[in-house]
Amino acid sequence: MAAYVIPTQSLATGVTTKPKVIIFDVNETLLDLEPVGRSVAKILGEREDLLPLWFTTMLHYSLVETLSDTYHDFGEIGTAALMMVAETHGIKLTYEQAKNAIVTPLGSLPPHADVAPGLATLSKGDYKIVSLTNSSFKGVEKQLKHAGLSDFFDKSYSVEAIRKYKPHPDTYRLVLKDLGVQPAEAMMVAAHAWDLMGAKNVGLQTVFVARPGKPLYPFMTNPDHVVKNLQELISIVGIPEKN
């Protein structure tokens, strides 16, 4: 069955407040996860059809851990989810094999083609640019450095600081509290509907980056804007020079 994608032009509600902070999700929003997908499919016997099951299982158990007040980092949960999928389909896999299939490519993901030039332009604006990710501090530092994006960010945040995964409200409030801004003064940019649902419920402005194959959830509150790439985001926020 084809994914249900809501037409982008019908969604824009308009941003009413110029953001002081632009918060970027990292994986899939900025970085291309295709190398991880290839690695996982290979270790599952070239079963590309199992990739959605692995990814949703990983997200499922990140939320289970949040709700049950336990915590393992995202790489560990991804590894455990991969072992579960393998076991269900009769594929023998050790923990180390599963871990290497995920962690190694995850640390060296390439940015999407629009990301580096888009962030370079956005970094000239008079707002802070930060990242907020489910990855660990060490993990996101390695990712952004490898992708050549580190210098574009004023600060990087990880859910590791509070041991709760997005879209828990406290993950977004972590950034707001640290930077001393009100929810309406912050803009969350992500390619995941669930991430924007969490941000919108806290009161943040939201922008959906419509990466291929990433639909919006029909029951969510519409994001303030839907863009195809960061160049379209630039046209929304404007680029006044920093003083």
Image (cartoon, rainbow, N blue to C red):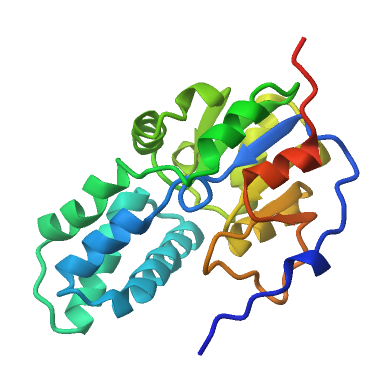
- Name the outermost residue toward the top: 243
Q: Position of residue 229 (x, y in %)?
A: 62, 49
Q: Position of residue 47 (x, y in %)?
A: 23, 77
Left or right: 26 as drawn, with respect to 206: left
Q: Position of residue 59 (x, y in %)?
A: 44, 64
Q: Closer to the camera, 89 or 167?
A: 89
Q: Closer to the camera, 201 or 150?
A: 150
Q: Closer to the camera, 73 or 43?
A: 43
Whether residue 72 appears in this view of the structure is no
Number of numbered tags placed on the structure image: 0
Q: Quadrant of the C terminus?
A: top right
Left or right: 205 as drawn, with respect to 115: right
- Name the outermost residue toward the right: 16
The answer to which quarter of the image holds residue 234 is: top right
Compared to residue 161, the image places residue 52 above or below, namely: below
The answer to which quarter of the image holds residue 99 is: bottom left
Compared to residue 218, the image places residue 119 above or below, namely: above
